[in-house]
Every structure is written in structure tokens, then in C-alpha cells.
Amino acid sequence: MADRRGLLIILSSPSGAGKSTLAKRLRAWDPSIQFSVSATTRDPRPGEVNGQDYHFISTDQFKTDVTNGDMLEHAHVFGNFYGSPKGPVQGAIDAGQDVLFDIDWQGAQQIRNSDLGQHTLSIFLLPPSIHELRRRLESRAQDDAETISRRMQKSWDEISHWGSYDHVLINDDLDATEEQLKTIITATRLRRIQQPHLMDHVRALQTEFEDLS
């Protein structure tokens, strides 16, 4: 048995708040943290690798997995299904490895309500201001004006669910936020429920105590 159970680390934020950058930094800090690979019913795009970028499966298989409880969370987006397969996540946390999820508040809620919810750590990242959020989206030069406008409209809906997360950080400084994330993860790894060996240790202490009497 592993010394500890892994965590399901959920990192959410509106687009442009630094989530992807901080996720990469966390994995650089601890390479044992796995990134959850989602399943999808859409066709692979050029260069995408099955099992690495996504698990590409049929719609029938996806619906069967949902019915059988094999998806921790799932959603229907622009005509395709997306979800997080439970099997690989269960295997990872049983082996003491953390799994990182880059999902929205709806997916986070589904995972918290799953039978692995007790091992979940959810963190929401807030931008320092809406003006700064727009500036970051524009400075990335990845989206046209219409896409940026659409992302901004969606951002408030995402921000409005900040209260459902375990921890909420204002990302006004990447380095400082990174250190806060490391502190939160390190502390949460020591939760009683994440340490399966504690019960055996307490029983051993009890036996030792009774032998003294």
C-alpha cells in the first residue's frame, strides 16, 4: 500500500487567469502529479495522440461508461461529449499519485459528488481585476476580438461559483500564487483520510500500550 492516497486536484478559473501556466509549474515542481486525460467523442485533430491528448471513443461507448459510473464528470459541448474516466484516476490515487484536473465549476461539482470526492482538493483562481483579465487575453494574441469578447462574457459565470471551492486565490503575482498552491497541496496531502497507514500505526500503539499494563 502507498504511504498516502493521491489527491484529485481541481484547478479552475476564467480563461486568462493563469490556470494553464500554474498547472505546468505544479507539474514541474512535482513531476509525479499526473494530468487527467479526458475522454471525448470528437474526432482527433492533426497531431493529437490517443491516450495522450485525449481518449478518443465512440458516442455509444461514452454513454455506456456514463451509465456504468465510469466517468467522474462529463459534459456535452458543441455536439461532442467530454469526460474524465474514473479508472486511471482511481489507479493513480491508490498508488499515491495526485491527479490534476483543468475543468470548470460544473465538472468540479460532479467530481466532489462522486465516490472519490473525499480525496478532492479544489482551488479557484481569481484575476486581480476584470480589466487585467481582458489585458491578459489580448496580450496572448491567440484569439480574435470576437472570441475574446465571448470569453469575457463567460468569465463572470465562472467567477460567480468561486464560493464552492476549498481554496480561492487571487492570482496577481504568478510566483506568489505558485508558492501558495504548493503550500495548499503539501498540507492537504497530510489530511488524515489521505494517510491509510495511520490506522495500523494507532493499532500498533494500542497493542504496545496494552503490553505495558
Image (spheres, grey):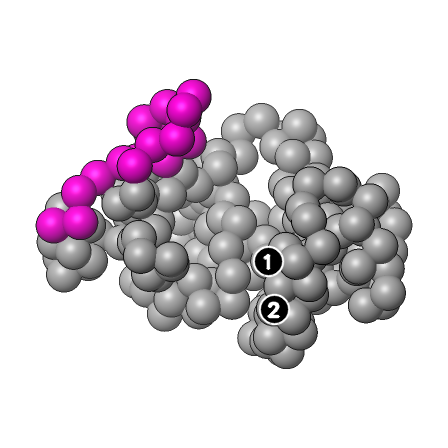
Identify whether 89 is placed above or below 156: above
Looking at the rendered structure, the secondary structure element under dot 2 is helix
Tag 1 secondary structure: strand
Q: Position of residue 87 (x, y in %)?
A: 26, 42
Within the image, what quadrant is residue 139 found in? Answer: top right
| 22 left or right of 106 in image | right
Q: Earlier in the sequence, mark 2 or mark 1?
A: 1
Quarter of the C terminus within the rendering: bottom left
Residue at figure coordinates x 45%, y 68% from the top left: 106
x, y (%) of residue 2? 40, 35
Looking at the picture, how far across and down is residue 30, in whole percent? Answer: 62, 30
Quarter of the image containing the N terminus?
top left
**Within-10-Å neighbours for mark 1: few <14, some 14–19, many 20+:** many
Q: What residue does disc 1 label?
A: 12
Please report the residue visible at 39 percent of the width from the left and 53 percent of the height from the top: 199
Give the CA separation, mark 2 to mark 1. 13 Å
Residue at horizontal 66 percent and vertical 58 percent from the top: 146
Q: Is residue 42 left or right of residue 16?
A: left
48 magenta-colored: yes
Query: Could you tell me if residue 86 is visible in this image?
Result: yes
Image quarter of residue 168: bottom right
Q: Quadrant of residue 17?
A: bottom right
Q: Mark 2 points at which residue?
A: 154
Amino acid, disc 1: Ser
Whether residue 116 is visible: no
Is 177 displayed left or right of 192 in the figure?
right
Work out whether 181 lies above or below 91: below
Q: Give the range drawn in magenta.
A: 43-60
Chief secondary structure of the magenta portion: loop
